[in-house]
Amino acid sequence: MMTTSESPPVALLAPMPPLLTKRLQESGFRVINAFEAAPEALLEVRAAVTRGSLDTGHAVFSRFPRLGLLCCWGVGYDGVDLAAARERGIQVSNSPGINAASVADLAIGLMISIMRALPVAERYLRAGQWQDAGVRLPAARGLTGGRVGIFGYGQVGRRVAARARALDMTIGCYTRRPPADDDVQAFPDLVSLAQWADVLVVAASADASTFHAVDARVLQALGPEGYLVNVSRGSVVDEAALCRVLDARQLAGVGSDVFEQEPQVSDALLKFPNAVLTPHVGGSTQSAQAALVETVVSNVTRFFSEGRPLYPVATGA
């Protein structure tokens, strides 16, 4: 479908895949880059797309006096000021579960990388040490027969558990609702889960109740032979405490796709050779991205046709 100056404008508040722009235009919308557009071009915008981890509140909303929908790319909306949205009559939507399988895949990939010490093995090979009969790598911890503790047993957590079963791992979790799976042991708190687990996978939603939930006590409970994997949000882990524990060699290793001050990563964390770090790419697979694009387009289309997005987020009373 050809778009014209009369087509409803949709503003992008963060960098988005070109496919999203293409599909929005095909659906009859005019796409505006909010960072490049003149202020007057934003006055008629009724729908905008952002990344849920970005701070979005009154300061942003004031640029869009007619905004009625803030559509988050992905499931998270922890950066959105829901009270401010409610005050201004702005609906918020997300894409629940769409990229959960891809995030779970990365969680397992990080687990394998740190528990099999793959970065260490690669450096050993590249340095030519393999040819030296006197230098041998120590045996890695491995996953088979290990215990994986999952913090948050939602869409991502359940998929991590399914993949861990295939690795012959025993599964425990700490979650708000008791798990329905008979083979998953529920723990009353994070510390007891960490004491039990060989690796703790953080897959909980980010909100006020989970801020720095993985603190020094939890990390020390994992112990010097324990591992941490975070595919949730950086705010769930106390990053300063994590660095202190790693520096004291009280943790065997960490794999993280998320950080407290994204896109900045602390120099302290970057220095550890037993830290495998990726730039928030958990949902960045071709299949997940294509599905997210279609969900965002559906949210926007449903808002304009029926006054309500396909997947609304409750903004409170």
Image (tube, rainbow, N blue to C red):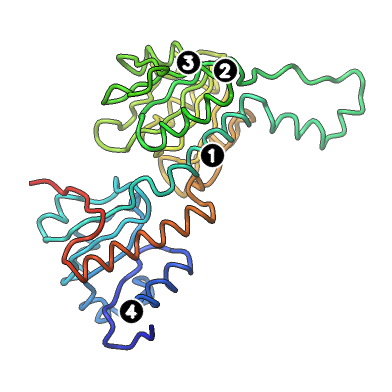
Q: Residue 42 at what x, y percent from top left?
A: 25, 76
Which residue is denoted by mark 4 in the rendering? 28
Which residue is denoted by mark 2 in the rendering? 249
Q: Nearer the viewer, mark 2 or mark 1?
A: 1
Q: Nearer the viewer, mark 4 or mark 3?
A: 4
Q: Nearer the viewer, residue 292 or 165?
A: 165
Judge left or right: residue 268 versus residue 40.
right
Q: Which mark is residue 106?
A: 1
Going from N to C along the chain, the mark reached first, 1 or 3, is 1
Could you tell me if the residues under marks 1 and 3 are in contact, i.e. CB atoms within 8 Å?
no
Give me the C-alpha separation between circle 2 and circle 4.
Answer: 56 Å
Could you tell me if the residues under marks 3 and 2 are in contact, i.e. CB atoms within 8 Å?
no
Q: Residue 94 at what x, y percent from top left?
A: 30, 53
- Residue 212, located in which quarter of the rendered image? top left
Residue type, mark 4 in image:
Gly
Going from N to C along the chain, the mark reached first, 4 or 3, is 4
Which residue is denoted by mark 3 in the rendering? 197
Going from N to C along the chain, the mark reached first, 3 or 2, is 3
Going from N to C along the chain, the mark reached first, 1 or 4, is 4
